Amino acid sequence: MSRDIDVLVLGGAGVDTIVHVPQLPLPYADSYMIEQGIRTRAGQTGDFVALGLDALGLRVHHLDMLGDDPEGDLVRALHTEKDIAFTAIPHPAGTKRAVNLVGPDGRRLSLYDVSRTQGEDRFPEDTVRTLAGASRHVHVTITQPCADALPLLRESGATLSTDLHDWDGENPYHAPFAHAADVVFLSATALGDPERTMRRIADRGRAEVVVATAGAKGAYLLADDELTHIPPATPPGPVLDSNGAGDAFAAAFLHGWLNRETPRRSALYGTLAGAHACTVPSTETTPLTREALLTKLVATP
């Protein structure tokens, strides 16, 4: 079977409304004056991974559900502008959306509108089979209804990755994703003992690589049963917004891993891309290109 797609990104398409607030947590007040404006733009986790992979030279296809609404139009326009193939399944409840409160130090608080998902949602099986069968790899976001597609994805013969985001290591919703993927990303934010959770993922599932990102502390890499700390990369400018940094890390790691780089070198790519993402305003979509990544790599000790 021809594998004309390098990475199929499943799920995670939507829009975010960005609000820059004076501090986080935000103290109660009747109103706040937002000097930097309030902006709504296309781009959630699947969109950012797709953009990052495309900028690094991989052939990408994105599949998700979208509503017939202005938010869906923004997502379609983004993929058209970036020339990224996109298959949109109509969704009557509308396009996924969120509000991101961003503090002066770049930290964010995300508010997700879960009314845009329904328990009976399913991707068409024929569509999933066709696209996964044409793909070398599938990156599965944890948005609904991606979990139901996992058995079909495994049957396709493509390798899988997923990002569990701020999983606490216990919420059962994340377990099918963690145990089905060959490469698992997650944030160390909610983990008291990252190594324990990472080893449980590897022991109970298929993962040959588990990566826990830790923001300014870098990342932890579990590969070949060895845990390694990956130092953080120095941001190339002021830290403006951490939104999308984890997605940039995942895209750059997969770029290395799919090109048969070692897990450690792939994680280094991830730290460079994540640091770059923190310097990009949340209202923009400017992922790190392959040429820029290689330039940064040469300058890295």
Image (tube, grey):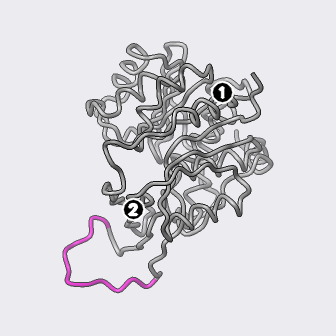
Count neighbours of disc 1 (C-alpha within 10 A) and say few if under 14, some if 14 to 19, many if 20 or more: many
Query: Does the magenta portion include 84?
Result: no
164 up-or-down from 77: above or below: above
Tell me which residue sits at (52%, 54%) in the image. 244
Tell me which residue sits at (38%, 15%) in the image. 204
Image spot of residue 180 (x, y percent): 46, 22
Q: Which amino acid does label 2 sit on?
A: Ala
Image spot of residue 191 (x, y percent): 31, 35
Label annotation for residue 133: 1
Quadrant of the frame with the C terminus: top right
192 up-or-down from 242: above or below: above
Most common SS among magenta residues = loop
Q: CA gap, disc 2 to disc 1?
A: 32 Å
Between 142 and 128, the one lying in front of the other is: 128
User: From which residue to which does the magenta span run?
Assistant: 24-35
Q: Which of marks 2 and 1 is in front?
A: 1
| Earlier sequence position, callout 2 versus callout 1 | 2
Between 119 and 14, the one lying in front of the other is: 119
Q: Name the residue under label 2.
A: 98
Query: Does the magenta portion include 29?
Result: yes
Q: Which amino acid does label 1 sit on?
A: Gly
Between 55 and 1, the one lying in front of the other is: 1
**SS for callout 1:** helix
